[in-house]
Amino acid sequence: MRLLSGQGAWLLQRITAVYAGLFVIVVLAYFLIAPPADHAAWVAVIAHPAVALGSALFVVLLLLHAWIGLRDIVLDYVKPMALRLTVLTLGAGALILLGLWALYLLIRTGLA
Amino acid sequence: MEFSIYRFNPETDTLPKMQRFTLPDDQVEPGMMLLDALLLLKEQDDSLGFRRSCQHGVCGSDGMNINGMNGLACITPLADLEAPVTLRPFPGMPVIRDLIVDMGNFWEQYRRAEPWLVNDSPEPEVERKQSPEDRDQLDGLYECILCGCCSAACPSYWWNPDKFLGPAALLQAARFIQDSRDEATDHRLAELDDAWKLYRCHTIMNCTQVCPKGLNPSRAIGDIRRTMLKKSL
C-alpha cells in the first residue's frame, strides 16, 4: 500500500476527515457550551498539553487531507505537465507554510 | 414526432450540426422502441449513421446519448421520450460519423482490466467448480454487455480516458476479483493500486444511473476498494 497514492491516499483522506470532523464538532460544542471568558482564558485552554496536542494533530491531518484533495483536483483537471507540477509545488509549499505557522502559534502559546 | 439528431461526416463537414427529422404520426406504433424510429428515419435519409445489431439490448451496439442520458436505442421505449428527441453520440468519445463513435480507448481500458480467468492449477477432469455462494458473488457483474453507456457518462473517464479504466472495465475487474476460481487476485489488486486506474473514481454514480442492464458499477468499484483494504490490513 503506497501512502500518498491509490488506496493509501484514499484511506488517509477518510481517516483524516473523521478526525477533523470530530475535532470541529468538539470545538464548536466547547464554544457553544463554555466559551472562554477572555484572551487569557483562551490561551490557557490552548496551552493545555492535551488541547495543544489535539490541535497540532488536527492541523497536520487537515493539511494531509487538503493535500490529497488538491492533488485529486489537479490530476483531474490540470493536464499540461509543467502547469501540473507548478500548481502541485505551489500548493504543497502553501500547505507546508500554513502547517508550520499553525504549529509555531501552538508552540508559542504553549510556552507563553 | 420530432427528432434532433447530431450529424457529422468527416469527409464533407468541418463542424457537426443538429438535423431535424420528423417521423409521421401514422408510423409511430405502440410499444415502438427508439431504434425502430431510427430505422424509419434512415429510410428518409440513408446517410444517417448509427450502429445496431441484435435490436434486443444484448449486443450493446446502439448506445447513444438520448435526451441527455446515455442509453440503448433498442430498449428505450419511444413513448417515454420527450419530443423533440435529441440524439447525440456518446459524450467524451471521438466521433467517427453521426452517432457512431470510436470506442478504441474503451476497449484498450477493458484489456487493461485483464478480463479473463487466471488459474494455473492443474485442470480438473470436469469443470472448475464453485459453490452456489461463490457463484452468487458474480451476479450483477457478469451481465455487462460492454455497451459503453457507463464509461461515456463518467466525468472521471472524460477527464482521464487514457489513465482511468472507467466503470465498465472496473466492473469487469471486479467480476474477476470476486471469482473464487481466479488465482490472480493479488496481482489484479496491486495493478489497480495507483492514483489513476481505480482511484480517479469519485463515486459520481452516473454509471449506475445510466446502465441499461440495471447494473451497479459504482458498487462494484466500492467492493474492489473494500477487498483491497481487507487484503492490505
Image: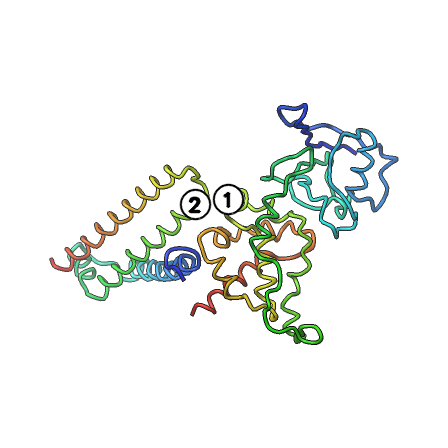
Secondary element at image label 1: loop
Q: Can you tell which quarter of the image residue B53 is in?
A: top right
Tell me what residue is drawn at x 83 percent, y 46 percent: B31
Q: Secondary structure at mark 2?
A: helix
Q: Are marks 2 and 1 in contact (CB under 8 Å)?
A: yes
Rendering quarter of residue B84:
top right
Circle count: 2
What separation in Å lies between label 2 and label 1 (alpha carbons)? 9 Å
Q: Residue furthest front?
A: B122
Q: Position of residue A43 (x, y in %)?
A: 17, 57
Q: Position of residue B143 (x, y in %)?
A: 69, 59
| Left or right, residue A57 beside residue A106 | right
Where does label 1 land, which residue? B160
Q: Chain of mark 1?
A: B
Q: Which mark is residue B74?
A: none
Report the residue at 66% width, 61% height from top: B142
Q: Is residue B212 above or below residue B12?
A: below
Label 2 Cα crowd, 10 Å radius (few <14 / some 14-19 / many 20+): some
What kind of residue is marked 1?
Answer: Asn
- Residue A88, horizontal then vertical, whole percent: 34, 44
Residue designated by label 2: A75
Amino acid type at circle 2 is Leu
**Taking B68 as reference, is B150 above or below it?**
below
